[in-house]
Every structure is written in structure tokens, then in C-alpha cells.
């Protein structure tokens, strides 16, 4: 397997996937999606990380998600909350849309491998982060385009702590200071939103210090 | 089943689906996609048909397809040709992208039923018109959003002639003069591109005269 495209949000998980993919594939490029997210600073993080690693980076604009859905990630009037049912940060169809567009792009370049950092262990209640969805998605993409796509999901069954340890093993820990995780979109990170909390918990459990700056 | 969204290209098949859906569902609305197609006149046709039937109509802009793919439908420098392999009019991932976006939109409105006019009988070599793709897509959508979508495909196993006869039975034949089929995007239709030819063949085999105007 020679070439791969990494779906890159600018966050910790996709950066871990990127470092993983650089060991596995000969050619790697990353794509990010501008979908009107409130934490747009993650796109800058993706660009910075790509530049640092010398990897081609493309941002694809998908304003349709913000136009059609109402959720806490694309609409500042919706409060970030978790609890019973789907969290308010769940963006309907986001991963399906991203993987579809990534696959369309990949096929034009003759690339069969897609890598995404979705993970069902600490999946925050997002149904489109589960393995059962990814398997079904891979099958659907193959049927739609008659093309042998493989969706690689190196983090699917890892805890956040395992991901941190994997990144340490891959020698990429220092890169994580350039990533962006915070839903609030602030730098230094807020340390309080569900995404920051999940990240901090992972580092704590791994016994490793997060190189990212947090608000005191 | 009460509400449905029809994916409407402005063409013959989706107009037949629309008339079919109006008999089956209490509330029907149609969506069309502006993806930079050269036959943009089909969007006007969709609007005109929606207006004629008093059905809400929404056009969703998806410039990403034209940005990412090279094919005869979005790029006038590519010649329309069929034959061995995928035809040059095949737009990679188009139906998967449209169904994904339609489902996202539908869920926001509490609508579980999607209707599309894809058909594998005369499928022009498009892999994303086959039933096996639609079944896989339905499963993937349900998993991605944890929502009980059903994709209705009333034309899947009909020949073009059968579709014409179905439309006659539904009493919608006259509406077909407002539809647009021609890949060249001209009105009157060219009568010579693969889409026009397929349409004319269907009417001929059904023994019914196409109410659409063709170039002499």
C-alpha cells in the first residue's frame, strides 16, 4: 500500500493517525474540511502540522453542513452540552459526508487508502465514530464508485490514554502541542469543554504531560 | 408513512418519482442539487414542476463536485462518450453525496423517507444506480445518524418504457414536457446525447409520444 489520504481535523487523533500513516505509506497527503465550525482555529493547526511534516495539505470547503444543520459546533447560539441522547455537539452526517468527499477526491488521484481517527472507545456518543458505521461506509463507497477503497481506523479500539501512548511510541508526542482540540476554539485551550476534558483525561491516564497550552 | 423528500434532478425519472410519491405520502417536498452541471437548465425544470404541483422546493448548492472531479457533466472540455468502462458522464460519488446531504436535511425536518429515481435496468453503467448500492447506502445512513431512514426506489427494476407507462397510469404524462433530460443542456433537447437517446427509446418502446420538444 503506497498512497493514503488522511482526513485531518487539526486535532490530536488525526495527528496521531498522520504520524501512523507516515510509517505505513510511501506517500501521504492530508485534507481538512471547512464546514463553518466554531473552532476554525483547528484548520490553522492542520496547516501548521502539514507544513511541519512536509506533507501536502488541502482544505475543502463544505458550507452545506452549516447551512443545513443546527448544532453546537456550527452555531454559537447552541450551548455545548452532553448527557442523555445525542450530545449537542453531534453534527448529523458529518463523518459520512467527509468520507464521501474524501473518497471522491482520492479516486481522482488514484488513491485507495483513507485514514480517519474515529474511535468508538471514547466515542462521545457519536454514532458515526463506531466501527460498524465505518465498515458499512467502506462497502458503500466501493459500490458507489467501483473502486477498492480501504478506510483505515488505527485508533478505533484505543482509549484516549492508549492513543497518547501510541503517539509516544511513534515519536510524535511533541507534535501534539500544535494540535487543536477545544470546542470553544480558543488558544490556549479552555480545558473545560467536553473535548478538552476527554483529552486531558487521556493524558492523565497515560501518565504523560500534554504539551498543549491550557488557560490557567 | 407521512412525509418524504424527493431527490429531484428536473428529469423524467425524478418527476415520475414525485408523482408516485404524491400518491403515497401525505407531505412531499423536493430538493435539487446545483453541482455545476452543464445542463443547469434541469434546475429550472425542477422549480417549474414543483411550482406546478404546489410542492415545496429547495436547491442545495454543492460546488465541491465540480471542484474535485473531472467529467463530461461538469466540464465542457470533456466529451460526452459511452462505451467500454465507466462513461465520461459518470460523476464519481454523485449519488452517495446527494443522498448523504438529502438525509442530513431530512433528519433536521423529522423526515425519514427519501425517494430517488435511480434505476439499474437501463443504468448507463453508473454503479451508484444499482440496488446493491442503495441498500448499502440506507444501512450506512441509519448507522451514521441513528435514524430510521428508508430510501424508496420505485423505478429500480423498471425499463425506461415501464417508467413511461407508470407515469401514464399515475396520470402525470403531461408533466414530462417540463422535464429536462438532455446532457447538452439545450431546450429544445438535442435528441442525440446518450440521455436523450435513452429517453426516446423508452417512449418508443412504450408506444407513447414524448411530450418534450426536440430539435428537428
Image (cartoon, coloured by chain):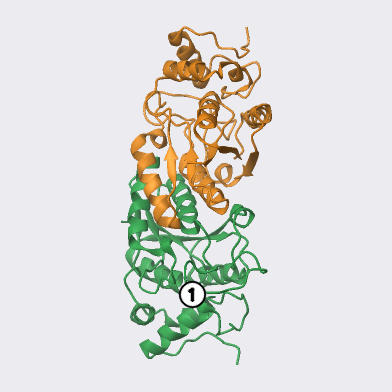
Chain colours: A green, B orange
A71 vs B82, left or right, is right
**Residue at (59, 59) in percent of width and height:** A35
| B183, B172: nearer the viewer | B172
| A31, B182: nearer the viewer | B182
Res A146 visible: no
B135 vs A198, left or right, is left
Instruction: Quadrant for residue A155, please give it.
Output: bottom left
Instruction: Quadrant for residue A208, please give it.
Output: bottom left
Please state the total of marks drawn on the protein image.
1
> Is disc 1 placed on a helix, strand or loop?
loop
| A162, B177: nearer the viewer | B177
Q: Chain of mark 1?
A: A
Please state the horizontal and vertical placement of residue A134, each as a whole percent of the image: 36, 57
A33 vs A144, left or right, is right
* Mark 1 closeness class: few <14, some 14–19, many ≥20 residues within 10 Å: few
B214 vs A21, left or right, is right
Please state the horizontal and vertical placement of residue B137, each as a whole percent of the image: 40, 45
| A149, A190: nearer the viewer | A190
**Residue at (43, 41) in percent of width and height:** B151
Please state the horizontal and vertical placement of residue B8, each as a whole percent of the image: 56, 34
Res A159 visible: yes
**Residue, disc 1:** A83
**Residue at (41, 64) in percent of width and height:** A129
Please state the horizontal and vertical placement of residue B76, each as a whole percent of the image: 60, 30
Q: Specify the quadrant that holds the N terminus of chain A.
A: bottom left
Q: Specify the quadrant that holds the C terminus of chain A.
A: bottom right
Amino acid at each position: 500500500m503506497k498512497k493514503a489520504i488522511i482526513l485531518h481535523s487539526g486535532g490530536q487523533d488525526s495527528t496521531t493517525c498522520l504520524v501512523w500513516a507516515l510509517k505505513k505509506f510511501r506517500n501521504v497527503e492530508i485534507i481538512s474540511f471547512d464546514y463553518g465550525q466554531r473552532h476554525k482555529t483547528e484548520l490553522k493547526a492542520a496547516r501548521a502540522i502539514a507544513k511541519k511534516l512536509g506533507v501536502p495539505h488541502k482544505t475543502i470547503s463544505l458550507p452545506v453542513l452549516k447551512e443545513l444543520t443546527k448544532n453546537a459546533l456550527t452555531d454559537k447560539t447552541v450551548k455545548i452540552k452532553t448527557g442523555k441522547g445525542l450530545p449537542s455537539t453531534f453534527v448529523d452526517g458529518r463523518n459520512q459526508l467527509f468520507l464521501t468527499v474524501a473518497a471522491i477526491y482520492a479516486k481522482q488521484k488514484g488513491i485507495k487508502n483513507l485514514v480517519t481517527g474515529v474511535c468508538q472507545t471514547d466515542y462521545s456518543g457519536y454514532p458515526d465514530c463506531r466501527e460498524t458505521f465505518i465498515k458499512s461506509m467502506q462497502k458503500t463507497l466501493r459500490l458507489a464508485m467501483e473502486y477498492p477503497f480501504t478506510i483505515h481506523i488505527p485508533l478505533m479500539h484505543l482509549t484516549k490514554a492508549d492513543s497518547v501512548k501510541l503517539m509516544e511510541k511513534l515519536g510524535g508526542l511533541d507534535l501534539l502541542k500544535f494540535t487543536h482540540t477545544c470546542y470553544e476554539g480558543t488558544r490556549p485551550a479552555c480545558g473545560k469543554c467536553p473535548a478538552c476534558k476527554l483529552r486531558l483525561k487521556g493524558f492523565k491516564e497515560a501518565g504523560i504531560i500534554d504539551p498543549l497550552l491550557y488557560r490557567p
